[in-house]
Image (cartoon, rainbow, N blue to C red):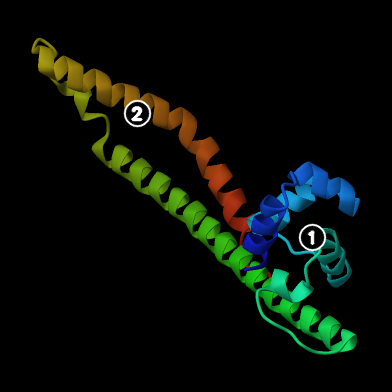
Amino acid sequence: MLSENIRSVRRSKGLSQEELAVKLHVVRQTISKWEQGLSVPDAQMLISLAEVFEIPVSTLLGEPIAASHTDDLKAISEKLEVINLQLSQRKAERQNAFHWAFLSLCAVIIIIAAILIALGSPYLSWNFADPEMTAAGTLLHAFEWLFSRSAPILLMGGIIGAVKTRKKE
């Protein structure tokens, strides 16, 4: 993949991300994003990368391309389009996973609240002369207390997160 090729060629040339960034007139974070596969260089930057590395662009892209210069640009553009599509699909999958995580958080909070309401603090009628019952009652009361204070904040965060991560059509 392009990100792995950029990283391996940079390392084989003995360049740090900072040194490569200076040669390409970009910030180091840009190089890092390319190497992590979070973004891809545009066609012109890919050509500049190949010039800095002193290798053909086809080597960076991982496939041999033996054609004219215009065909090279077309092939590079097509390859970058595929890579961008893969990145957008990964981003959509990640967004979908976060969406379902936020919805699950909301559901768990509602279920726990319903259970606590249905139970109605049963520990209040327990015999606290027994040390085990005292410990269990204290733990249950502490859980109820912490839950009643944090649940509204977590529920609002879950709702906001679910709304912000939903698919826009």
Q: Residue furthest top?
A: 129
Residue 166 placed where, x, y %? 61, 63
Q: In 3D space, how far apart are the residues under numbered discs 1 and 2 (Cα atoms)?
A: 62 Å
| In the foreground, 95 or 54 | 54
Q: Residue at x 64, y 55 (%)?
A: 36
Left or right relative to 118: residue 12: right
Left or right relative to 89: residue 49: right
Residue 90 placed where, x, y %? 59, 66
Q: Quadrant of residue 10?
A: bottom right
Residue 75 placed where, x, y %? 78, 84
Left or right relative to 159: residue 54: right
In front of the other: label 1 or label 2? 1
Answer whether residue 4 is visible to the viewer in this image.
yes
Q: Residue furthest left?
A: 130
Left or right relative to 16: residue 135: left
| Dot 1 amino acid type | Phe
Residue 4 marker: none
Residue at disc 2, secondary structure: helix
In this picture, is 105 found above or below 54?
above
- Image quarter in which the C terminus is found: bottom right
Q: Residue at x 62, y 58 (%)?
A: 165
Answer whether residue 169 is visible to the viewer in this image.
no
In this picture, is 66 found above or below 123?
below
Residue 72 placed where, x, y %? 82, 83
Q: Residues within 10 Å of mark 1 (few under 14, many from 20)?
A: some
Q: Which residue is mark 2?
A: 144
Q: Residue at x 21, y 21 (%)?
A: 137
In this picture, is 123 found above or below 117?
above
Q: Which residue is mark 1?
A: 53
Q: Residue at x 86, y 64 (%)?
A: 51
| Dot 2 amino acid type | Glu
Q: Residues within 10 Å of mark 2 (few under 14, many from 20)?
A: some
